[in-house]
Image (cartoon, grey):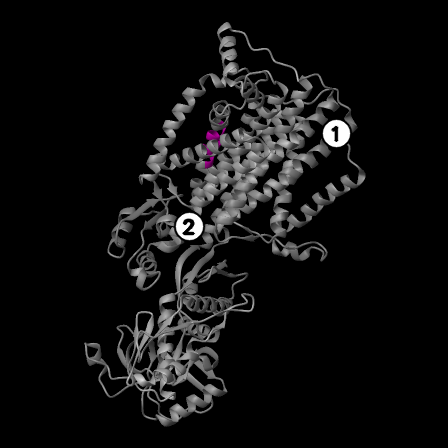
Amino acid sequence: MLYFSRWKTILIWVTVVAGLLISLPNLLSRSHLDALPDWLPKRSMTLGLDLQGGSYILLQVDRPSLEKARLQSLLSDARNALRGARVGFSNLSESGNGVDITLLDPGQTDAARTALRPLSEAISSGLLSGGSVSEVSIDEPQAGRFRLGLTEAGLNLRTSNAVSQSIEVVRRRVDELGTTEPVIQRQGNDRIMVQVPGLQDPQRLKTLLDKTAQLTFRLVDTTASADEVARGGRPPAGTQLLMTGDTPPRPVLVQNQVMVSGANLSNAQAGFSQQTNESVVDITFDSRGAQQFGAVTQQNVGRPFAIVLDNVVLSAPTIREAIIGGRAQISGSFTTQSANDLAVLLRAGALPATLNIIEERTVGPGLGADSIKAGQMAAIVGGVFVIGFMLLCYGFLGLLANIALTINIVLLVALLTLLGATLTLPGIAGIVLTMGMAVDSNVLIYERIYEERRNGRSVVQSLDAGFSKAIGTIMDANVTSLIAAAILFYLGSGPVRGFAVTLALGIVTTVFTATTLTRWLVAIWFKTRRPREVPRGWWTPIPHGTRIGFMKVRNFAFTATATVSIIALVGFFSGFVNYGIDFTGGTVIEARAKSGQDDVAKIREDLSSIIEGEIQVQEFGSEGDVLIRYGVQTADAGRPQASVEAARTALSAEYDVQRVEVVGPTVSGELAYAAFAGLIAAMIGIAIYVWFRFEWQFAIGALVATAHDAIMTLGLFVVTGLEFNLSSIAAVLTVIGYSLNDTVVVFDRMRENLRKYKKMPVAEVIDLSLNETLSRTILTASTALLALAALYFFGGEVIRGFVAPMIVGVVVGIYSSIYIAAPLLIFFKLRGDQTAEDADTKKAAASGNSPTVGKA
């Protein structure tokens, strides 16, 4: 095991050097990168929104408005089809999600059926789907009557097509902002995710995305008074009452017929009026639009002509003369920015359907810079803690482990860079946690080397056996953590996925550096120095040869733990949990006082007239920072984000908004389901793996221990009142992975000892195994806790609630490996002669003698 061929050595160091070169750009500024030779990689990791600021917005197609528009189109198509076939009808109207038709002459039923049949013809559902769907169903309740209904499949197809078209429109709008590396992706059948890092004005992005930008030109109806209609009068047939965008708005009566559509625009640019010097938007039509616009203005000289955007009248000037040439001007109380934004919307084109903002997460650039500093400090302090601890406990071998740990982090950063991963604050937490967990593999190897040396093997034999016997345990322990990370990535979203990716890649690099690189370093050291003894450290938290009788108190421990777990579960599901907006829906606003001094009572008073329901305002992080939380607002149902805009306005004089998170009730329900499904899936997946690698008793023990750790960690949120959100689920899943890591190590030693001491009672085998692995358990837990402590104290307020449950989970995981997983092996009678063995154990304990250890 300590022999390395030349090609293996070359391959190892080629990997290390490649990792160094790929990760190097992350440490250099842009000017230094430009100075590097062209053959060197210059790509660096992309910083997430929480580190550089920006906006994450989840848009959803407004299906009701899409259905309504399709119904109006179907109504018009049915009218034209019947008139074209000269079929008379006495009724043609919308009803529910369909159109009802009553013929004047039931004898024309066959003719009507023939005329309407093309409306129900199937259309292709896409090249890749390989099928077709019918958008319209035709029913005949009785002779002379028809009902045209919109099919679910047809609406789904139209929604999907609207998303595809909207993505391109959204992309063009976002690109007009001049941002770099925006991410615009489809999510499911009816959603679009927009992520714009580094955006300085997130409110402007929301304004651009919140408008459908359906521009129409319609004639103003002058046969009736708009003011009278607005006071409750009936508008003339074929007209519609709209309001202007002025303050206060004015009513305008416009004709339903669209004279010219915004789809015929070829360009739009913001400018200034030569007459009034006000901001305007100059538009240019394509050839067809120019022809239509010229004909309409020529035929309606002297009549007002309304310019309508999303059912709001921008202006209604009177046509003084025919406008030939395809050029026109839109005016209407614009500022320079609003005129420019309107030009952006018109150039990008109209959305095929209304898009509602159902989730928003916005971080200001100042808060992102603070997060970077906090993450760097946590990483440095955590690294110093872990490196110092390993040197103290293992001396020269600890130095080799630290070299491997440093290269481990370099390779992890290189992989993240190669994959184009986005580094988030939870991602930094994943890197720091990897530092704490990476040395676990080295601890396993070194403790095994010491054990083999104590058993009388030579130095070279001990080194070789330490690596060869620990590899299987290392693989089993890390696969369980990898399962948790994979499920976390599959069911998570945003920063949670970033943490999962970092954790998973950290496991891969850890296995490589521990089983290959560290072994190479040890082999080179041995060949060059030929030591007579294995180096040791200056201190160990657990002395060798402990004989603690863990199983003697197993019944008491199991009963006490079961009681506490039941209390934790009851408290959790009885509502004694501070659920975050990820699960309840609502809004979180983090603000910083401009004066440096916050006034919680005044904030609550200022917002009470704007926000309905309870408003939670608390000091958060450094002095002057406050966190504001409130539930889902009725006002947001009619106009998404209305409450956020009102709160921003109320706070703007005294506070700068640093972060905004808005989660709608639909999204919160989905997140809650996915989160708890992830917990259950992780436990089942890990149990299946343990069953496959060990025996069914071990699988049950692992499953129950995992459930125990999850329940106890959830109990922390009941007792402390910490906010329970998606990051909390990520923390619980990480605890599960870490706890199973420890449990599998113990199980692996139990399996080895069960084969070795075939006549020893199971309880004694378990005690022996627990004592033999106790030093490794405490050392690994210590390194993980040191890294987590650095995150907790130096990682900033945002990440503190994410780290706290992991700190508790590490301690709980040690306990569950000893007093939950292990006793279950006795309860489920891992050996058939369990009763006799228990009797022998009790007899030996009563006589004060230790049972005789059998030989392999």
Q: Residue furthest top?
A: 847
Task: Report the residue at 68% width, 21% height from top.
Answer: 452
Please give left or right for residue 436 compared with residue 344 in the image: right
Placement of 713 over or under 128, stated as above or below: above
Give the label on residue 525, or none. Answer: 1
Residue 514's disc is: none
How many other residues sit within 10 Å of disc 2, few (<14), some (14-19) or many (≥20)?
many
Visible in this render: residue 445?
yes
Residue 671 — which label? 2
Residue 664 is at least partly visible in this image: no
In the picture, measured across the screen, residue 831 lies left or right of residue 709, that is: right
Relative horizontal placement of residue 201, taking residue 577 as reference (left or right): right
The kind of secondary structure the magenta stretch mainly shows is helix
Q: Position of residue 783 (x, y in %)?
A: 55, 31
Q: Quadrant of the N terminus?
A: top right
Q: Earlier in the sequence, mark 1 or mark 2?
A: 1
Q: Is 287 or 830 nearer to us in this picture?
A: 830
Magenta-colored stretch includes residue 211: no
Q: Is residue 810 magenta?
A: yes
Q: Relative to 627, does residue 232 appear above or below in the rendering?
A: below
The quarter in which the C terminus is drawn is: top right
Instruction: Decide which of 321, 254 is in the foreground and name it.
Output: 254
Q: Marks 1 and 2: which is nearer the front?
A: 2
For badge 2, the amino acid type reads: Leu
Q: Residue at x 66, y 50 (%)?
A: 22
Residue type, mark 1 in image? Trp
Question: x, y percentage for residue 227?
Answer: 21, 80
Where does the magenta region start and end? 806-814
